[in-house]
Image (spheres, rainbow, N blue to C red):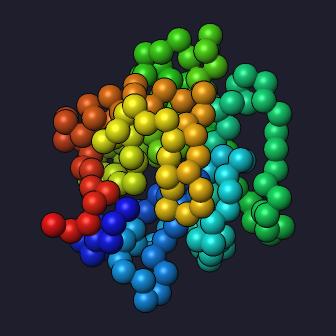
């Protein structure tokens, strides 16, 4: 993401800020880019923890997403997890399954799972149907055929074989077109 005072202000001014996986927040003195607040963290057990991930963790809700457990993947525990940090688990039958159904793909046969970003958007729309939902940081909205993600922190990573981001981009684009959410661009203020 390029620096953007308006994007950072919109994020920090929201009633609830949900971040996913290897997220970063603005460091003191750095150009405003993605804001500094985090209220809820959606993560998978394979997440590489960024410096922002555990910052002020006692003030946040951490929600574990485990869609691949539906297919027999074993439970894994992040090595860097603080001993005093608990978390809630998003049940697959209540979250991953309805998202997979909305995508309309043969998810059981192909062992597919929604991305954490799409899951965050779906949860925001379904848990807060009257809210104005702002979405940002999801690159496949603009590039549904990408094969890797360049996160704000760390190396580029390949899109996992369990994801169908072109289908997810279509779902998110439909929500954006319907006015159910607004997308804050990844490029800076212009």
Instruction: Give the residue at x 49% y 35%.
Output: 147
Residue 80, compared with residue 123, is above or below; it is below
Residue 6 image offset from top left, x and y in percent:
24, 71
Instruction: Give the residue at x 32% y 28%.
Output: 170
Residue 62, compared with residue 145, is above or below; it is below
Q: Judge from the rendering whether residue 70 lies leftward or rightward of residue 25; answer left or right.
A: right
Quick check: can you spot residue 40?
no
Residue 59 image offset from top left, x and y in percent:
60, 73
Q: Judge from the rendering whether residue 88 lies leftward or rightward of residue 78; answer left or right.
A: left
Instruction: Give the residue at x 59% y 56%.
Output: 155
Residue 131 image offset from top left, x and y in percent:
29, 52
- Which residue is more in the foreground, 60 or 43? 43
- Which residue is more in the foreground, 96 or 113? 113
Task: Locate residue 1: give its quadrant.
Answer: bottom left
Quick check: can you spot residue 9?
yes
Residue sitting at the far bottom: 29
Total tally of numbered discs in the picture: 0
Q: Judge from the rendering whether residue 123 lies leftward or rightward of residue 82; answer left or right.
A: left
Task: Locate residue 75: give its quadrant.
Answer: top right
Residue 164 image offset from top left, x and y in percent:
48, 26
Instruction: Give the residue at x 47% y 58%.
Output: 18
Residue sitting at the far left: 190
């Amino acid at each position: 993401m390029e620096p953007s005072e308006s994007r950072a202000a919109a994020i920090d001014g929201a009633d609830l800020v949900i971040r996913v996986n290897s997220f970063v927040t603005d460091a003191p003195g750095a150009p405003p880019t993605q804001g500094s607040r985090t209220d809820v963290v959606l993560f998978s057990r394979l997440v590489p923890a960024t410096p922002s991930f555990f910052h002020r963790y006692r003030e946040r809700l951490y929600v574990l997403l485990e869609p691949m457990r539906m297919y027999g993947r074993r439970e894994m525990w992040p090595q860097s997890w603080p001993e005093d940090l608990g978390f809630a688990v998003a049940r697959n039958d209540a979250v991953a399954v309805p998202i997979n159904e909305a995508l309309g793909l043969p998810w059981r046969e192909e062992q597919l799972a929604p991305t954490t970003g799409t899951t965050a958007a779906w949860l925001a729309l379904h848990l807060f149907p009257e809210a104005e939902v702002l979405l940002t940081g999801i690159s496949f909205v603009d590039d549904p055929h990408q094969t890797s993600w360049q996160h704000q922190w760390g190396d580029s990573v390949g899109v996992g074989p369990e994801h169908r981001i072109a289908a997810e981009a279509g779902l998110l684009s439909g929500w954006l077109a319907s006015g159910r959410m607004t997308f804050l661009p990844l490029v800076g203020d212009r």
